[in-house]
Amino acid sequence: AQDAVEDPAATIAEAAPKGLAAVAGLLDHLFLVAADVPADSMAEDEAVNSGLATLAVLASRLHVLHAADDVALLASLALNWQPRLGARGPSGPVWRKMGRQVSTLDCNGFNGRTDRVLGHGYHSEDEAVDYYCQHIAASTPRPVPSTAGGV
């Protein structure tokens, strides 16, 4: 059974299943793009059960790329009766507690160029790819120049 979030002041890492401690930070970055999961899946009473708590522990940084005009996610909202993370972006106390571990990119400004019908193709737009590259490059260790040979 998964652990429940009992203390509202607990961090998501503390709320996640205890066996994950050995692999915390396994991934440098995890990009949630057009995520068709409930926007409140990181609510304190849902965080562990949604599986996002696991992802939050496994990744050093979570990135949420979202677009309010993503028609596919609006359809999912109509079917599921719950706002989608990929349409709304992160909000709520658990996301705020994660602080700098979470970065977001609002894709409304460039959504719809590739997929004009559903507006669900922004993951491959130049702005999104630049975002991925910038964040990955910023956390990639640079090789230290060798001083061999007296230089």
Image (spheres, helix red, strand yellow):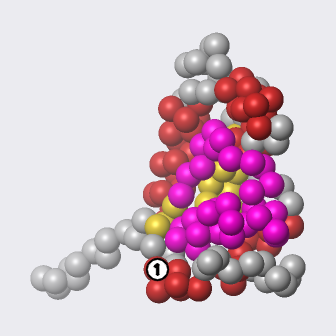
- Location of residue 78 in the rendering, given as x and y in whole percent from the top left corner: 80, 29
Whether 10 is drawn above or below 63: the answer is: below
Task: Assign the C terminus to one quadrant of the image.
Answer: bottom left
Q: Residue at x 55, y 19 (%)?
A: 114
Which residue reaches farthest front? 1
Q: Is residue 52 above or below residue 87?
A: below
Residue 66 occupies quadrant: top right
Is residue 45 in the magenta section?
A: yes
Q: Does the magenta run of residues contain 28?
A: no
Taking the image as shown, residue 75 lies to the left or right of residue 9, namely left
Q: Is residue 14 left or right of residue 18?
A: right
In this view, the residue farthest toward the left is 149
Residue depicted at 40% across the width and 70% down the height: 141
Vertical relation: 73 (above or below) 131 = above
Give the magenta range: 30-59
Instruction: Examine the rendered structure and indicate whether residue 27 appears above or below residue 38.
Output: below
The residue nearer to you, when weighing 76 against 135, is 76
The amino acid pointed to by label 1 is Val
Pick the front one: 148 or 99: 99
- Residue at the outermost top position: 117
Depth check, front residue: 113 or 43: 43
Residue 88 x %, y %: 79, 42
Residue bearing mark 1: 23
Q: Where does residue 56 sit, x and y in percent of width and height? A: 62, 68
The answer to whether residue 20 is left or right of residue 8 is left
Q: Quadrant of the N terminus?
A: bottom right
Say left or right for 25 vs 113: left
Residue 90: where, in percent of width, then height? Answer: 77, 53
